[in-house]
DNA sequence: CTAATAATCTAATGAATATTAGAATAATGT
DNA sequence: ACATTATTCTAATATTCATTAGATTATTAG
């Protein structure tokens, strides 16, 4: 029926990116993958969905070339196609924050302590971390920390926080961060630490937001990708 | 059925942006709106769709807060909610170019003369324009030019190009641009001018791309928005 | 080889979307 | 007031999408 001009085809291609990002669960998967490479059932568990559904969503993401896969033994490991995909996620989230009042409200309820950071604040935080005046605490799972983390951050995954709490000195203010503004782990960590008498602030940035702002990460410990699955 | 956690709701909100950008025609409308404020039937005509369908798509864009409306007489004028919406479009298009091979191929077919510009190239172009060594030619319709254009660009809409062709001196190389990499107007202008013996290059940037790269525009001639339609 | 695990594919459901036609609303000009 | 123009709303269609269950492929362990 339709002639489908060349122009239409171009917009059609870009719309594939829009389609891929039109599902909340797919966005959640993208945010998880921005932390580190993960297997399908790891993703399914962390996103709270069934494996079959996760696989279906991941297929859509793969077909829109936002994620790539490789196989390691029985496992298929997914990762983002590039840093620019993480940047797209940050761009979309920030746009939503700016224009969707409901989202701003929801975020305020989530945590009134989280403020938007300017480049200056991030530089300042980094300088304080370098000078050892504060403790930057990464409460994400270990593998995500190992894949890349804020400079001078130390890792205590949220699940281990109560047992390992004595590792943290009380002399310095703590700045805790997790996967990003939508992640609740740092807020939970703050609650845990505050009841033990620590002084804790939350950094709403995850590594995507930090990196999108042009700030440096500590280098990845990523293994080389050996066997790439085609397409 | 679902409890719908707070986290889910947050991703849900961002997914609204994805849904709004998941239709090729809506993206085309966004690109048109990035040029200037337009009425519904102007948008429908330029996008090559019926008014009813345009209105429906615009409703979706309005509900996702990507565009705003105001009323002037009988007309409802649509515009982007902010510069960040234009930046999202550029981000999505560039991501698609980087990761979708089909898109890259289609663009190459479209015009092999178009190259990606670096910040340096753009600065260079601007300097040449300032020194008057080149003519920067805006071939978009007048109202889009008046709404904002590249520094030192002169306006000859494509429709008037053949009649007004003697306005252009042959002593200087011409750099033509239009709405952006997906727009064919500058390519058509190049064909017209080349047959008349002009030396013409195409700048693939439209004003979105130029501005997203941090380059300055010549100030808008926009009228103040008087009557805003609620929501 | 067989059993077990990880992931995908197929098929089927209901829900959401795109598109069009027809009616309704709102502002303008006579 | 009336006819005209611009736009939106309502309703109806065909299409596409999300989700789940069941069968299937690929890999490892024994």
Image (tube, coloured by chain):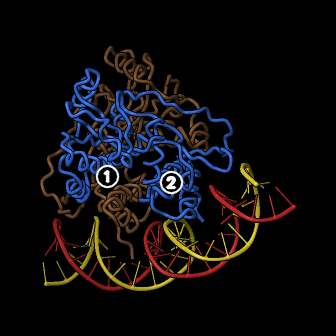
Chain colours: A brown, B blue, C yellow, D red
Element under label 1?
loop
Q: Image quarter for residue B229?
A: top right
Chain under disc 1: B
Give the percent coordinates (x, y) of residue A161. Answer: 42, 36
Query: D19 left or right of A61?
Result: right
For label 2, the residue is B43
Give the answer, above or below, for where B101 lies relative to B135. below
Q: Residue A12 versus residue A88: which sits nearer the camera?
A: A12
Give the answer, above or below, for where A64 lies relative to A195. below
Q: Image quarter for residue A55?
A: bottom left
Mark 1 in CB contact with mark 2 (< 8 angstroms): no
Give the answer, above or below, for where D9 lies relative to B201. below
Q: Residue A121 versus residue B21: which sits nearer the camera?
A: B21
Q: Residue A172 versus residue B157: which sits nearer the camera?
A: B157
* Mark nearer the N terminus (1 vs 2): 2
Give the percent coordinates (x, y) of residue A52. Answer: 38, 69
Give the percent coordinates (x, y) of residue D12. Answer: 62, 80
Give the percent coordinates (x, y) of residue A50. Answer: 42, 65
For label 1, the residue is B184
Q: Which mark is residue A213?
A: none
Residue at 38% over, 46% down: B160
């Amino acid at each position: 029926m339709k002639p489908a001009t060349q122009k239409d085809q171009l917009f059609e291609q870009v719309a594939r990116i829009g389609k891929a990002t039109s599902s909340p669960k797919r966005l959640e998967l993208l945010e998880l993958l921005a932390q580190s490479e993960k297997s399908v059932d790891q993703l399914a568990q962390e996103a709270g969905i069934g494996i079959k559904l996760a696989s279906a969503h991941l297929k859509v993401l793969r077909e829109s070339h936002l994620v790539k896969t490789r196989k390691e033994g029985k496992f298929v490991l997914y990762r983002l196609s590039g840093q620019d995909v993480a940047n797209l996620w940050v761009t979309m989230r920030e746009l939503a924050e700016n224009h969707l009042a409901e989202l701003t409200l929801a975020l305020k309820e989530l945590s009134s302590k989280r403020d938007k950071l300017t480049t200056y604040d991030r530089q300042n935080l980094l300088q304080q971390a370098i000078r050892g005046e504060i403790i930057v605490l990464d409460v994400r799972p270990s593998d995500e920390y190992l894949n890349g983390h804020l400079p001078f951050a130390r890792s205590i995954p949220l699940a281990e926080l109560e047992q390992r709490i004595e590792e943290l000195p009380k002399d310095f203010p703590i700045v805790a961060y997790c996967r990003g503004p939508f992640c609740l782990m740092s807020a939970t960590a703050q609650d845990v630490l505050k009841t033990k008498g620590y002084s804790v602030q939350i950094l709403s940035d995850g590594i995507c937001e930090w990196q999108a702002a042009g700030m440096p990460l500590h280098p990845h410990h990523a293994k080389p990708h050996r066997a790439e699955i085609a397409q």
